[in-house]
Image (cartoon, rainbow, N blue to C red):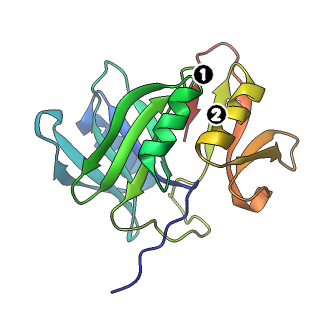
Amino acid sequence: MSEKTYTPGRVTWRELMTTDVERARVFYSEAFHWRIEAGMDMGEAGTYFMCTAGDKQVAGLMKSPAPMSYWGSVVSVTDPDAAVAKATELGAKVMLPPTSMPGVGRYATISDADGAVISMLKSDDGDPAPGMPKLSELYWESLSTSDVARASAFYTQVFGWQSGVGSNGVAMFSTHGTPETGVADVQKAQGFPPHWMT
């Protein structure tokens, strides 16, 4: 049995919450050539579908609890309870408090002080190995925010990210302060609400 490894600060999972599961399954199967199969029974929330590119699971898909569809990013953390406590101290709202999900791990969702929503997870099985993404895999996040400096201060404290500037001159977050370990770019929201985008 291989030892579990963790890579705190990396976005290790993405989820699509959709108002039309069947239409989304058809769309992403055709657009990205994903295989989308029923996974976990979520009770009243419905079925959680697993999206696979090649032989790698890359995302989840399920019915949205809100009258809108959106992608969500999930960050690996060593302690979701501590991360949520720090986020709350810095002005975040808790959307889903730290919750232990059997076979998955300890999961939580917050909206930052600007209203952008992001999730975190301490996985029961460890994190997937980092590496260059292959065709049809998701690999990058973007944060649109009304206050880049405030967002930088928030996420460096909550997720331990480092803020800097990429080679293209755009603000970015990374796990070790270099473009090679980049997690997301950060831009001023213009004409739409602050949000995270995969």
Q: Are marks 1 and 2 in contact (CB under 8 Å)?
A: yes
| Residue in the image at 72% along x and 26% along y | 150
Mark 1–mark 2 distance (CA, rounded to whole Å): 7 Å
Q: Decide if residue 144 is on the left or right side of residue 26.
A: right
Front in this rendered view, residue 81 or 106: 81
Image position of 106 with respect to 19: above or below: below
Residue 22's disc number: none
Label 1 amino acid?
Pro
Residue 194's disc number: 1
Tag 2, which secondary structure? strand
Q: Decide if residue 126 is on the left or right side of residue 173.
A: left
Image position of 60 with respect to 192: above or below: below
Residue 143's disc number: 2
Q: Which of disc 2 and disc 1 is earlier in sequence?
A: 2
Front in this rendered view, residue 136 or 8: 8
Among all residues in the image, which is located at the extreme top?
Answer: 191
Image position of 16 with respect to 5: above or below: above
Q: Do we see residue 11 in this rendering?
A: yes
Q: Position of residue 7 (x, y in %)?
A: 55, 64
Q: Position of residue 5 (x, y in %)?
A: 48, 73
